[in-house]
Image: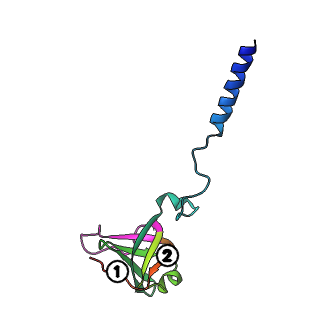
Amino acid sequence: MQRMFLFALVLLCSTAWLGAQDQTPQNPPAGSSQTGSAANATSVEGCLQGSNGSFTLTDSSGTTYQLQGDAAKLSKHVGHQVQITGSPSKSSAASSTSDTSSQQSLTVEKVKHISETCKNTK
């Protein structure tokens, strides 16, 4: 009888322990937002260029990203090396060339200033 009670207690504790195991993280990873786009967030470092609400970021490999988002955040960093964290989005400006793979579009969520000057790009 005592063994059966001990077995039931162990089984109950094991069930409670397994139920307490949560597969989702309680805190979002650093650099991601708490919105639904957190899973798609990406960070890119490069040289910020543009004006009048049209901004681009060129990374060290030469890939150019069309940036969409808060122009006030971006305009004060034009000509600087920055790290942009954002989510990929469809570009509203379609390229007239057949090579559209070299330009991507990001919706800016966060801007981190790296340097007053841009590093050389390819």
Q: Amino acid at mark 1?
A: Lys
Where's the N terminus, which quadrant? top right
At 50% from the left edge and 82% from the top edge, which residue is drawn? 71
Q: Residue furthest top?
A: 1
Q: Is residue 72 above or below residue 36?
A: below
Residue 65 picture quarter: bottom left
Q: Residue 112 bears which disc, if any?
A: 2
Residue 54 picture quarter: bottom left
**Residue 96 shown in magenta:** yes
Q: Residue 119 bears which disc, if any?
A: 1
- Left or right, 74 with respect to 12, comes to left
Question: Disc 2 versus disc 1: distance between alpha carbons?
Answer: 15 Å
Image coordinates of residue 121 in percent, x first then y, are 30, 78
At 48% from the left edge and 72% from the top edge, which residue is drawn? 108
Q: Nearer the viewer, residue 7 or 15?
A: 7
Q: Nearer the viewer, residue 121 or 78?
A: 121
Question: Dot 2: what SS?
Answer: strand
- Left or right, 96 with respect to 40, comes to left
Magenta residues?
86-107
